[in-house]
Image: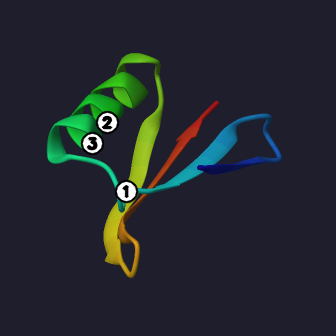
Amino acid sequence: MTGTTTPKGGVVMTWHTSTTTRDDLQQLITHIRHCGGTVASCQRCAEGLLVTWFTL
């Protein structure tokens, strides 16, 4: 998992899901939304899925 800070003080996180089950991914997305985060994208990549989200 990697993260960078946005100019407005939020955080953009990226997570490669190569070793993650579908249930774990669903729990991650639910947790992100529960904490006020927004899933920006979820796309296939060489490592599995690349999930990017941000918080303010």
Q: Which mark is residue 37?
A: none
Q: Amino acid at mark 1?
A: Thr
Marks 2/1: CA distance? 12 Å
Asked if disc 2 and disc 3 are in contact, CB closer than 8 Å, the reply is yes
Which element carries disc 2, helix, strand or loop? helix
Which element carries disc 3, helix, strand or loop? helix
Asked if disc 1 and disc 3 are in contact, CB closer than 8 Å, the reply is yes
Establish if 53 lies above or below 56. below
Determine the image quadrant of residue 33: top left
Establish if 8 lies above or below 33. below
Which element carries disc 1, helix, strand or loop? loop
Front residue (pair 48, 14): 48
Residue appearing at x 16%, y 37% in the figure: 23
Marks 1/3: CA distance? 8 Å
Q: Amino acid at mark 2?
A: Ile
Q: Label 2 neighbourhood size at 10 Å, few (<14), some (14-19), many (20+)?
A: some
Question: Which quadrant does the C terminus fall into?
Answer: top right
Q: Label 3 neighbourhood size at 10 Å, few (<14), some (14-19), many (20+)?
A: some
Q: Which residue is mark 3?
A: 25
Q: Which residue is mark 1?
A: 17
Front residue (pair 34, 27): 27
- Horizontal arrangement in the rendering, residue 47 relative to residue 25 (left or right): right
- Horizontal arrangement in the rendering, residue 51 relative to residue 22 (left or right): right
- Horizontal arrangement in the rendering, residue 38 relative to residue 14 (left or right): left
Location of residue 55 in the rendering, given as x and y in whole percent from the top left corner: 58, 33
Q: Which mark is residue 29?
A: 2
Location of residue 18 in the rendering, given as x and y in whole percent from the top left corner: 36, 62
Q: Amino acid at mark 3?
A: Leu
Q: Label 1 neighbourhood size at 10 Å, few (<14), some (14-19), many (20+)?
A: some
Front residue (pair 10, 18): 18
Establish if 30 lies above or below 46. above
